[in-house]
Amino acid sequence: MRFLLLCLATSTAIAQTQPAAFTKILDAQFSLRQYRHVAISPDARHLAWVEAIPNRDGSESENSAIYVLDLSSPSAKPRRVSQGDSKSAHGEHSPAWSPDSSRIAFLSDQGSPTDKRQLEVFVTSVAKPAARKLTKLTGFLSTPRWSPDGRAIAVLFSENAPRAAGPLEPSTKESGVIEDHIYEQRLTLVDPASGSSRSITEPDLYVYEYDWSPDSRQIAYTAAKGNGDNNWWVAKLHAIDVASGKSRIILDKPETQIAVPRYSPDGQSIAFIEGLMSDEGSTGGDIYLIPVAGTASPRNLTPARKTSPAYLHWQPSGKLLLTERVDGGSAVSLLNPATGETETLWKGDESIRASSDDLSISVASDGRTSAMVRSSWSRPPEVWAGPVGDWQPRTHANEGRAPVWGQSKSIHWKTDGADVQGWLLYPNAFDASRKYPMVVSVHGGPASAKTPSWPGTGYELLASQGFFVFFPNPRGSYGKGETFTRSNVKDFGYGDLRDIEAGVDAVVHEAPVDPARVGIGGWSYGGFMTMFAVTQTTRFRAAVAGAGISNWQSYYGENLIDQWMIPFFGASVYEDPAAYAKSSPIQFIKNVKTPTLILVGDSDAECPTPQSYEFWHALKTLGVETQFVVYPNEGHSFHVPEHQRDVIRRASAWFTAHL
């Protein structure tokens, strides 16, 4: 039986506690122009991107369009090259350039019923932008990519899948006899001339990422058997002969997760990233190189590097262009695989992204000209392109927006002898003679990091309401090397909480924060850390736990992605239950005195609703002030704009009332 307490955005309590000015701030954030899936042409002459088409009220919708800009003409204006006109109600995604830069393959649900949203592969010519539909498939498609010889378009295809792939999406509600329904995602080749398609990977294998060999004869890919949402953490590295369909395993037993496989220019080696990763798409680790022939073990090219590489691209010279998280910021570097020497080409306190993967960039054939969306706390998102480190803005829709938060500072401190970093966001209209309340915002993951970016509806907006906001990157985070990322293994809630509390002490020493008015909040792992923190200390006067985990032992059997836990806990819960009990907030629940707001989606597969319900039920029973809000038809990531607004409205009201 599922228990739901539905208290949504129109509640009288929220309306009474939220000033009208905050509603205007939220309206402004939702009217931000959104850019996704940036792709520069191989010849570096054109730039394509996906632009969201907002609803009439300015809020984000599922509809989007593809635009192309001629970079060779200073006076050129972006033009739409995909299906339909500016008012067309359909979604378009993932532009992919042909190797000769003349055509773009992309995914669109144009022509599909609005309740189906069936994506298909389309192709358009840059010279004559009339798009042609290639496929007629049923299921979920993603990641189109042309073969280097231009004779095929590869795509990932899950036939008859009822929803988008990934554990962040709302889970399918089940009833009756419960069975594993596995929709395998297979590498599928599409003929750009005829539109015919054929799947080439095994029907019982779920493919996650892939890369064409330079001669178009092979494809390397990461894949695992079984449920796709759950088995990314145990994926192996494979290669398949395109003509014969014969496949083989190149790397059978990676030590931890692997991602971003990339063939070397000579086709003899594959580079990839291996590391302790908690979420698919949030990549960090060391860079490895393995012979395609499988005649040797992978070689670590970045041992002891104090950064977290996230994305790779081979240059024609045989060097690797890589993006990486560095001490709370982002960087683009050049790595010589032969010597291990690296050169930092650019570093900034901002976020960059060209696809759904963090820190991804799109790179032209010259290996240096690139494009991405850039944003920071002082710069709203726009599409940029040019040589690495000399990028120029190519869109301007968000220019002129002023932050509604104050300045930001990078804060450093030591805990247990280790260097730790975090970001401090000052209140808007800061007055140095005053003492302010502060909210600590703990990021998800735990293998992730907070980097500066123009916020959507995140905790940054609390700075507009008179709060300092502190974003620590405690042990387990990216940005300081693989040893630091692994330093919370079998220690959830202990060392990372010491890091956070020491960071609060460092902030109080540096800024006019009232130590008696400090709150804590977060989502996912940040939700767990919030639950755990209030069981360990009373220094936090208010808490907001979003999609948290209250009981690691019961969580193991409730969530749909248990494979991620074994590298962090050392064994399954059935083999070592004590390791899971040690870090479970519910074990220490009678210590809680902190008023706690609890939020979750009712279809969350990563951090299921019962985890939040268990924590709320305990607080209510013990007489601790609490409120529980469950959002209908939402997964781990919320898609409904009004629910997104409601989360930050409630958090702001809760912290305002208690701090």
Image (cartoon, rainbow, N blue to C red):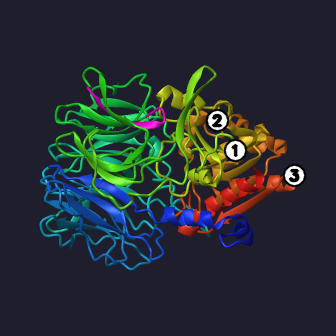
Q: Are marks 3 and 2 in contact (CB under 8 Å)?
A: no
The local secondary structure at tag 2 comes to: loop
Cα distance, mark 1 to mark 2? 9 Å
Amino acid on which disc 1 is placed:
Tyr
Q: Is residue 444 above or below residue 133?
A: above
In which quarter of the view is residue 74 placed?
Answer: bottom left
Can residue 353 be seen in this snapshot? yes
Cα distance, mark 1 to mark 3? 31 Å
Cα distance, mark 3 to mark 2? 36 Å
Query: Is 95 in the magenta?
Result: no
For disc 3, the marked residue is 622
Q: Are marks 1 and 3 in contact (CB under 8 Å)?
A: no
- Magenta span: 326-336
Q: Nearer the viewer, residue 431 or 190?
A: 431
Q: Position of residue 161 (x, y in %)?
A: 43, 65
Q: Position of residue 198 (x, y in %)?
A: 24, 61
In which quarter of the view is residue 438 placed?
Answer: top right
For disc 1, the marked residue is 436
Q: Are marks 1 and 2 in contact (CB under 8 Å)?
A: yes
Residue 311 lies left or right of residue 483; in this view the side is left
Q: Nearer the viewer, residue 658 or 153?
A: 658
Image quadrant in which the N terminus is located: bottom right
The local secondary structure at tag 1 comes to: strand
